[in-house]
Amino acid sequence: MLRVRSLIPLFGPSRRIAWLPAAFLVLACGCSQSAPEDRVAAFSSDHAPQGSMPKNRSADSLRSLSPVFGGEGRVKNRSADSLRTLSPVFGGEGRVKNRSANSLLTLSPVFVGEGRVKNRSADSLRTLSPVFGGEGRVRGSLGTQVGSQSTNGSVKDPDRSRLVIHSDPAPPAPGTLRIATYNAAMYRSQSGELARELAKGDSQQARGVAEVVQRVQPDVLLVNEIDDDPQGQVAELFWQNFLEQPLEGLSPCHFVEYFTAPVNTGVPSGHDLDQDGQTDGPGDGFGYGAYPGEYGMVVYSRLPIDRARARTFQKFVWYAMPDAVLPQDPGTGRAYYSDNILSVMRLSSKSHWDVPLTWQGRSLHFLVSHPTPPVFDGEEDRNGRRNHDEIRFWADYVDPQRSGYLEDDQGTCGGLPEGARFVIAGDLNADPQDGQTYGGAIEQLLNHPRIASSFRPASAGGLDAARRQGQANDAHKGPPEADTGDFADEAVGNLRLDYVLPSRDLQIVGGGVYWPLPDEPGARAASQSDHHLVWIDVTLPSSASTP
């Protein structure tokens, strides 16, 4: 999120318009079959030694449960401070409250009245199934209740939270893919400044961000808000000097490829987009930024990237979207932007990328973006409306009946074919219940028939932060454990803004938000950004066909 700590009033009214200048009612889409030629870079597979995935650990070595459970999974009689994640269940001295299972809501499927662990199968320990193995032994932890899933990967049992013991997830099971998004807030005031900092290898922020990534160990990672530079140095320096270096005793990530391409932030439009009387300010770029490439994006991957099929939509013009919710002057009812501006005004505040990955011989489309925050505007709500349509882009792109108008930077039209598998990821800057985004922006994805959205990653840290910080958080409607951003408590509060949303033909088997409690390992590293990494674990049904 761009400079989100300075937010005062959030977002804007929800007013939809259907106005378009007559000159733009007829759209010509000159489709070609040429392949995109994005600036990309690859790392040699020599940098990815075999067996680089983290090893599975025994219960005794699982720090995530050591404050609460002993070697055999029995409850230790510890003080309340050491049982922080179980505070709703344990009293002041750490003893289990003598209540019925029905009143121990967070642990009722696991603990009986006296707090003893039931020796049940994983199926009957549903709220802690990633924590307990088949016989109830301690195994590790993830972020949220997965719920029962149908054979096509859709989640039938939505929105059931479970206790999170610790933020560091266990390694994914064989055949499982871990996909993450992380707004790293690694932007600087001048072009090239971040590259020079990363070249020295001693950036504390970069070390913290890399430590978080190493604790989660994703196979595929989108980094938002990492400055882009013309030479592509930042993406490689962050990989070489930080992600590939063992930090705090952790294993390096061993990504083998990355993808990056130009973004719209700081690219001059030549127009006074923010109507401040000037045409050369940061608000006059096609995306807000002091220089080209500020708040850029990078995709890191352990999987091969199909570069010949990668697509970018940096230059897609906003008015070309049918029924775009273009802003209007609230005083006159006329268009906020002139015809001249609309003829060049781009939809993406950064860019929209379709990065195809090859996984188990099949194609998986990694659909990434970073829509503008729906703030820093006026009553015309130009940023709120743009955020709405940037999110709508993906809702249309994954639907063959609605995507024909979308033209990429190489002139090829259309979106994904029927049956294509995908994962949408990024800081989408839209909370489904709190804040004041325009017109149900994120619901365009959460309610989409092709997207599996019932699984909601969560963290103990988010819940703890909302309770400690209070203020605006106290009035929020959404579950605080699902929050991903930590913002000014007196005005905004914490919000769910970052998402990893797979297609329904992928089975979700786990996930979470990396937001440790203040005294947990990784908490200091996680504080280097005002956003928190979000990940999901998915498997590919063996019966699925290759699109």
Image: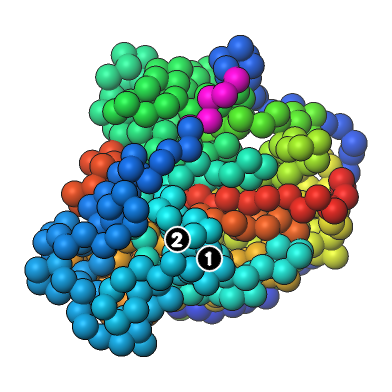
Name the residue tied to disc 1.
121
- Compare residues 410 and 454 and report the one nearer the observer: 454
Q: Position of residue 350 (x, y in %)?
A: 54, 44
Secondary structure under badge 2? loop
Label 1 to label 2: alpha-carbon separation: 6 Å
Going by the numbered disc 1, the residue's amino acid type is Ser
Secondary structure under badge 1? loop
Q: Which residue is drawn at 20% across and 79% down?
A: 97
State if disc 2 and disc 1 touch (CB < 8 Å): yes
Q: Where is residue 272 in the image (x, y as percent from the top left)?
A: 47, 49
- Compare residues 62 and 134 and report the one nearer the observer: 134
Which quarter of the picture shows residue 176?
A: top right
Q: Residue at x 48, y 68 (%)?
A: 120
Residue 52 in the magenta stretch? The answer is yes
* As drawn, 221 above or below 109: above
Q: Residue at x 61, y 12 (%)?
A: 46
* Dot 1 or dot 2, earlier in sequence: 1
Name the residue tied to disc 2.
136
Report the side of 175 relative to 542 (left or right): left
Which quarter of the picture shows residue 128?
A: bottom left
Does residue 402 show up? yes
Q: Position of residue 138 (x, y in %)?
A: 40, 53
Report the side of 541 relative to 496 (left or right): right
Q: What stretch is highlighted in magenta?
A: 50-54
- Compare residues 65 and 39 and report the one nearer the observer: 65
Name the main secondary structure of what is drawn in magenta: loop
Going by the numbered disc 2, the residue's amino acid type is Gly
* As drawn, 335 above or below 215: below
